[in-house]
Image (cartoon, rainbow, N blue to C red):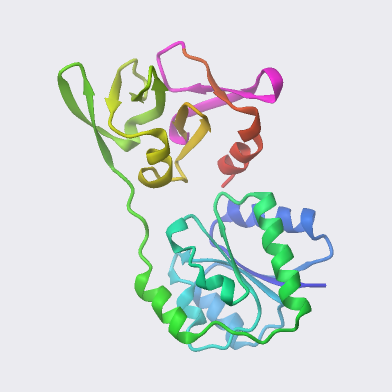
């Protein structure tokens, strides 16, 4: 049986991890759950007998990396975070993994399989302190766009990201639409660019090939044809907003973060 120490300060994310552990590895035991760097530091100093560390990076009182500093951590660590720019290849050389939020079940399963291989080898490889120092030095939360320069006809306007209900493709152009409005504006970004680098993944989600929505402007969702979901957004238009069938499960997990 593998004993797990979970480091996560978001209650919904912790519940998601707990549910997945119980589903994917029912014989594993969650030994302890801590929410702060201070609690993690104490658990490590107390020489807690655990086999695997599931560890968020950015906690309320700082970076979890700082608790790992100056300690010999031989157990495999699966880092869990919303920031994909910190998925360093160096982790592979230390037999640890890196899982992005929202947590996908299949992705976590792969991380668990990797953990089992690590433990079966009885390896004593630890994260080097130089590597941890570099992580602390390089880490800075990603900055997402707070506003977009948009155009309608020959007029230009700044639209706050908070006020945008959705982005979508129409006739080869990318539009944004404000909440509680039928006004739409053209923006000079593709949905791929918006999704991968410009929008906060905890707030915006790509529900299908042609639309990204803002969860803050979602009112309700209903089952729809062929296993899809029909969304009711804060929009005045009559457009049907539908989550693609292949994205439904991930979308529900994302909402629960």
Place of residue 68 in the rendered image (x, y in percent of width and height, measured from the top left): 51, 81
| Residue ID at (15%, 18%) | 154
The x, y position of residue 52, in whole percent, is 68, 73
Which residues fall within the magenta stretch? 215-238
| Residue most extreme to the top | 238
Towards the viewer: 113 or 240: 113
Asked whether the viewer can see residue 83, the reply is no
Q: In which quarter of the view is residue 42 placed?
A: bottom right
Residue shown at 37%/60% (left/top)? 141
Is any atom of residue 107 visible in this view?
A: yes
Where is residue 217 shown, x and y percent of the image?
Answer: 44, 30
Q: At x 28% / y 24%, what residue is drawn?
A: 186
Quarter of the N terminus within the rendering = bottom right
Q: In which quarter of the image is residue 173?
A: top left
Q: Which of 75 and 46 is in front in this view?
A: 75
In the image, residue 33 sits, relative to residue 218, either above or below, namely below
Q: Does the magenta stretch include residue 234?
A: yes
Q: Is residue 6 left or right of residue 127?
A: right
């Amino acid at each position: 049986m593998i004993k797990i120490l979970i480091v996560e300060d978001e209650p919904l994310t912790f519940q998601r991890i707990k549910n997945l552990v119980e589903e994917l590895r029912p014989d594993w035991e969650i030994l302890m759950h801590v929410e702060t760097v201070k609690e993690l530091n104490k658990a490590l100093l107390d020489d807690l007998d655990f086999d695997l560390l599931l560890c968020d990076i950015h906690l309320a009182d700082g970076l979890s990396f700082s608790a790992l500093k100056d300690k010999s951590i031989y157990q495999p660590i699966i880092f869990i975070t919303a920031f994909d720019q910190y998925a360093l290849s160096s982790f592979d050389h230390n037999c640890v993994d890196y899982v992005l939020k929202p947590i996908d079940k299949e992705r976590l399963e792969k991380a668990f399989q990797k953990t089992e291989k690590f433990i079966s080898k009885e390896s004593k490889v630890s994260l080097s302190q130089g590597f941890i120092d570099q992580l602390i030095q390089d880490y800075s939360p990603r900055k997402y766009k707070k506003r977009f320069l948009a155009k309608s006809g020959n007029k230009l306007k700044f639209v706050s990201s908070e006020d945008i209900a959705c982005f979508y493709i129409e006739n080869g152009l990318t539009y944004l639409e404000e909440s509680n409005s039928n006004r739409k504006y053209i923006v000079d970004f593709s949905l791929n660019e918006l999704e991968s680098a410009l929008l906060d993944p905890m707030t915006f989600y790509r529900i299908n090939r042609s639309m990204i929505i803002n969860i803050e402007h979602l009112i309700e969702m209903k089952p729809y044809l062929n296993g899809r979901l029909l969304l009711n957004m804060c929009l005045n238009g009559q457009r049907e907003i539908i989550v693609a069938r292949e994205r439904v499960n991930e979308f529900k997990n994302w909402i629960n973060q």
